[in-house]
Image: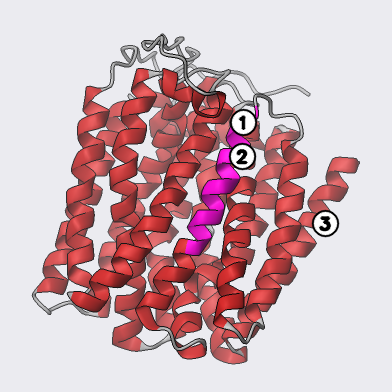
Amino acid sequence: MGSPQIPTGEVLAPAPVPLESTTRVPHTFRALRHRNFRLFISGQIVSLVGTWMQNVAQSWLVYRITHSELLLGTTWFCSQIAVFALGPLGGLASDRYSRQKIVIVTQTLSMLQAFALAALTLTKTVQVWHVLALGTFLGVVNAFDMPGRQALVIQMTSQEDLINAISLNSAVFNAARVVGPGIAGLLVSAVGEGMCFFLNGVSFLAVIVCLMAMRLPRFEPHPPAPVMQHLIDGFRYAAGHQAVRRVLAFMAAATFAGMPAFVLMPFFADDIFHRGSKGLGYLMGAMGIGAVIGTLVLARRSSKTGLGRVMVVSGLTTGVAYLCFAYSRWFYFSLALMPIIGYSVMRQMASANTIIQTSIPDQYRGRIMALYAMTVVGLGPFGSLAAGAIAGRFGTRNALGCGGVLALVASSIFAWTRRR
């Protein structure tokens, strides 16, 4: 299948990254042979714990102030809608400018956002509109941060270690999901949400320092094509690439299916199971444990062969687990389901990320990864609003049940298109 002409922007393939450590590294962790990736992961471990603390504390703050499913969904909408609206511009920037510098700037702005939210909460002046406004600001930052970080991974490692790097990055993300919510639950109970926001701000210092310490090939910009032509060319490439197009469509459906589980979890923890903020921390931590296991198993793969099947099986498993969780009457049964959900969701996401990244040339990487971010994050706001609206009208359980049905249908369609 033909593809559109290569734009005149950044057209160099990523330079090979030297293996600066000759120490034998286990196969599961082989991407850690690369110094730049070791630095990146080190910063991520600290920063992502803080990010998950803020995510849980922010949901609990809005829930405590409003007790409204719709406003809880609106909070997610405001924090993620910019990723959908501005994602293409973020991808365009990642293909035209230094990805390392872009990520340093975005991480610094994210740190300032966390400190602002902490100041408002600790001084007891925070209102819902503050949370919505700061969430919108963070969404704008993430619209440029996500494609930049995703496209930077291959520059920190190599093509042959890409699937391992993506899986290890996902494992760290979900290890933080285990630790962060648990810490957040304890801190919220002891000292309130503000301390979670403050510690998140401090955690960004680790990733900023590590990014600045990386030794990447010097960015050599080429005379860029006109902005609009460059942008349209990225959309045209994605539309004409069958594998990319199918994976993006499937992940869009998976995002809608999963939003009720994430947005409405405080209601399950408190209103249904009566376990409060600690129960929320246990549920989210259990999901993270499953996700870490799933991505580490995936990290052992050396080839993308069979990843489409992994996406299908993961989607079907997730759909069944959502349905069981939605109508469960027992907290501990629901807690046991969360690792299964985490295992399946993150294997699906890491597989999709790997299929896309190994199927595209580097000159399109920023723009295509922006489209990926738009499907797995940018569509989240619409899913969160839908989840809140359905829960308000038909109940929290039925909203998650609808997500389970959608996951099963989308997985079946994707499996059918693969067979064709």
Q: Residue at x 43, y 43 (%)?
A: 172
User: How far apart in space, not on screen, are marks 2 and 1 (Cα)?
Assistant: 6 Å
Q: Which residues are magenta?
A: 286-301
Q: Tell me the amino acid under the disc marked 2.
A: Val
Nearer the observer: mark 3 or 1; the answer is 1
**Contact flag, marks 2 and 3 (Cβ < 8 Å):** no
Which quadrant does the C terminus fall into?
top right
Of label 2 and label 3, which has the lower sequence position?
Answer: 2
144 shown above or below 268? above
Image check: 241 left or right of 164? right
Which quadrant does the N terminus fall into?
top right
**Residue 220 at x, y = what percent?**
34, 12
Q: SS for tag 1?
A: loop
User: How far apart in space, not on screen, are marks 2 and 3 (Cα)?
Assistant: 24 Å
Principal secondary structure, stretch drawn in magenta: helix
Q: Residue 294 colored magenta?
A: yes
**Contact flag, marks 2 and 1 (Cβ < 8 Å):** yes
Q: Residue at x 45, y 89 (%)?
A: 274
Q: SS for tag 3?
A: helix
Image check: 355 left or right of 11? right
Q: Residues within 10 Å of mark 2 (few under 14, many from 20)?
A: some
**Closer to the camera, 94 or 263?**
263
Q: Residues within 10 Å of mark 3 (few under 14, many from 20)?
A: some
Pointer 3 residue: 412
Pointer 2 residue: 297
Pointer 1 residue: 300
Q: Residue at x 47, y 34 (%)?
A: 228
Q: Tell me the amino acid under the disc marked 1.
A: Arg
**Residue 224 at x, y = what percent?**
41, 20
Whether residue 20 appears in this view of the structure is: yes
